[in-house]
Structure formats: C-alpha cells, structure tokens
Image: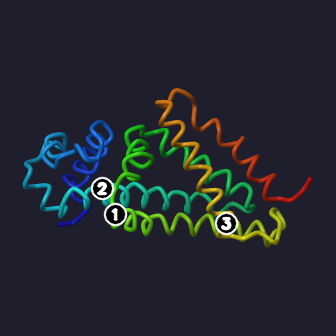
Amino acid sequence: MKKTKPKYNQIIEAAVEVIAENGYHASQVSKIAKKAGVADGTIYLYFKNKEDILVSVFEEKMGQFIERIIESIQEMKSASSKLLTLIEMHFRQLAGNYHLAIVTQLELRQSNAALRFQINNVLKPYLAVMDGIVKEGMSDCTFRNDLNVHLVRQMVFGTLDEIVTNWVMKEGKYDLVSQAPIVHDLLINGLSGKE
C-alpha cells in the first residue's frame, strides 16, 4: 500500500490524537481505527503494529518538517538567520499541533529501546541541518572557530527540546513561538565568543 493514500494520512492523524489523549500504552489499535473512521483490519494494510504506527507518525511529521526547514534556509546567507529560522520553525511546528507536541515530547520517550533507535534514525537529517548551520557559522566567523560541532548540536537540540517539553507540561498556556528570538539571542551570544 502506498503511504500517499488518504486512509494512511487519516490513520496517522488519528494516531496523533489518540496517543496524545490516552498515552501510547493505553492506545489500542482499535481506538486509532475508530478515530480514523476505518475498520481495525484496514490499519494492518498500512502498518505492522502499534509501534509501526508510532514510528510512522514521527517519520511523516518529522520528514515534512525537515523538508520545510531545508527549503526555508536554503537561500539564507547567514548562519545566524538560519538558526533563528530553525528555532522558530521548531517551535511553530509543535505549537501548531498540541497533540503532536504531547506525542513527541512525552509519549515517544516512554517507548522501548528499539523504537527509540528508529526514532533517532529519523532525527538524523534534522541534526545534520543543525551541524551544517554550526559549521557555516564557524567558517563565516559568526561563531567561534574552535567549537565542537557535535556538542553544540546537542546543546541546541537539547535547548529547543526542553523548552517545548516545558511548554507541553504547562499545557501550552503561553506563546511558545515568541520565545524563539530570546533563545536565538542566548545561543548566538554563547556561540560567538564575543564579549
């Protein structure tokens, strides 16, 4: 079955809602099927099991998100503006879909080691984008030239991840996207090495 079929997308969207509302472990395939408006058996035409649904949710949403980021920063000239765009888009993606934020920030963390490994593989292209921005900033002197790229990427991703998790835990009661310029400023000033 092709993943472009409407039912595939219906199931993905339904899974995000069901998992966010019930938690991953309490989200039976039958609940996802009911929410998607399909028969239980239809789910198995597209997915092997519940774990496959969760990974597919992440692949779909993260894949689209990475494509949009790459497209948005392609023409930008400075590492600083690329980083700001990445931060804004990261926050906007999750602020725009609270259920998805719950799934990515809370439910994915509770999955087993094999699932987390698959999810980490999905994240690799996003982390590569971050690496590219850091390297570019080092070569154009926006950032210090003695940075450990891997460590900086962990720091940037960890910062964004923790800010979104905090926003989810506070039930999205404040404007997440408005935090982007502040976070950008803190990161840029820390990475530039300028006093």
Q: Residues within 10 Å of mark 3 (few under 14, many from 20)?
A: few
- Between 160 and 175, the one nearer to me in the picture: 160
- Secondary structure at badge 2 equals helix
Residue reaching furthest right? Answer: 195
Whole-percent x and y of residue 142?
A: 82, 62
Whole-percent x and y of residue 23?
A: 30, 42
- Secondary structure at badge 1 equals helix
Tell me the CA gap for discs 1 and 3: 24 Å
Q: Residue at x 64, y 63 (%)?
A: 153
Whole-percent x and y of residue 37?
A: 14, 42
Question: Which of pointers 2 and 3 lies earlier in the amino acid sequence?
Answer: 2
Q: Is residue 42 left or right of residue 175?
A: left
Q: Quadrant of residue 53?
A: bottom left
Is the Cβ of the residue at disc 1 closer than 8 Å to that at disc 2?
A: yes
In the figure, 126 relative to 35: above or below? below
Q: Quadrant of residue 48?
A: bottom left
Quadrant in which the N terminus appears = bottom left
Give the amino acid type for the residue marked by disc 1 in the picture. Leu
Q: Residue at x 10, y 55 (%)?
A: 42
Tell me the CA gap for discs 2 and 3: 28 Å
Question: Which of pointers 1 and 3 lies earlier in the amino acid sequence?
Answer: 1
Tell me the CA gap for discs 1 and 2: 9 Å
Give the amino acid type for the residue marked by disc 3 in the picture. Leu
In the figure, 79 relative to 174: above or below? below
Q: Which of the numbered marks, if any, corresponds to residue 54?
A: 2
- Secondary structure at badge 3 equals helix
Q: Which residue is mark 1?
A: 115
Give the amino acid type for the residue marked by disc 2 in the picture. Leu
Q: Which residue is mark 3?
A: 151
Q: Is residue 87 left or right of residue 66?
A: right
